[in-house]
Amino acid sequence: MKLSTRTRYGTRALLELALHKGKDPMSLKDIARQQQISLPYLEQLIAPLIAGGIIRSTKGPKGGITLARKPGDIKLSEITHLLEGSVAPVECIDNPEVCKRSEFCATRDIWSELKDVMDDFLQATTLQDLVARQQSKGQKEPSMYYI
């Protein structure tokens, strides 16, 4: 199973914001440059993250986006749900009616267990955990990524 580019890029953009926490709002242009994401694509990811209460937007000359909550309060499950939807590896997990075998299918049980493990992991992992992982890789400041 692969996560979509929406989820991967959206999570990277949020990591950039978390690393920048406590400073002025960041422009989308700066986030796009730092994370090597196209600006038009990044712009598409912002609306669901604002609607979901993950980020807030500030207008004006010093405007941009910031995290709406502390990185430790933002779970990867929230981000994934907003940008990806379900992480079920097969459609019959969320919608058993799509297959008449769902009720008696042993393979569906395995895919359901896989989804549960993924959900549990994403629920237990926060944006702050990603910050710690990034910092352990020796990149403490966002501007150190791509010079």
Image (cartoon, rainbow, N blue to C red):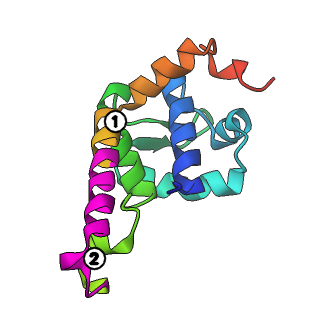
Image quadrant of residue 117? top left
| Residue at 73% in and 40% down | 36
Q: Identify the magenta region.
A: 99-118
Return the disc, 1 or 2, that comes first in the chain's sequence: 1
Q: Is residue 53 visible?
A: no
Q: Main secondary structure of the magenta part?
A: helix
In magenta stretch: residue 116: yes
Quadrant in which the C terminus is drawn? top right
Real-space Cα distance between discs 1 and 2? 27 Å
Q: Where in the figure is residue 50, as x and y percent of width and height?
A: 42, 50
Q: Amino acid at mark 1?
A: Ile
The answer, for residue 147, to whether it is visible in the render is: yes
Q: Quadrant of residue 55?
A: top left
* Up/down of 43 relative to 109, above or below: above
Task: Using residue 85 as the reference point, say whether residue 23 is left or right of it.
Answer: right
**Residue 74, which numbered label?**
1
Whether 73 is drawn above or below 45: the answer is above
Residue situated in front as seen by the camera: 77 or 90? 90
Is residue 109 found inside the magenta-colored segment of the image? yes
User: Which residue, given by chain and number where applicable, does mark 2 sit on?
Assistant: 95
Looking at the image, is 101 positioned above or below residue 63?
Answer: below
Q: Which numbered marker is on residue 94? A: none
Q: Residue at x 54, y 13 (%)?
A: 136
> Which secondary structure lies at badge 2?
loop
Front position in the image: 28 or 62 = 28
Residue under the point 39% across and 69% down = 90
Where residue 131 appears, as percent x and y from the top left, is 48, 22
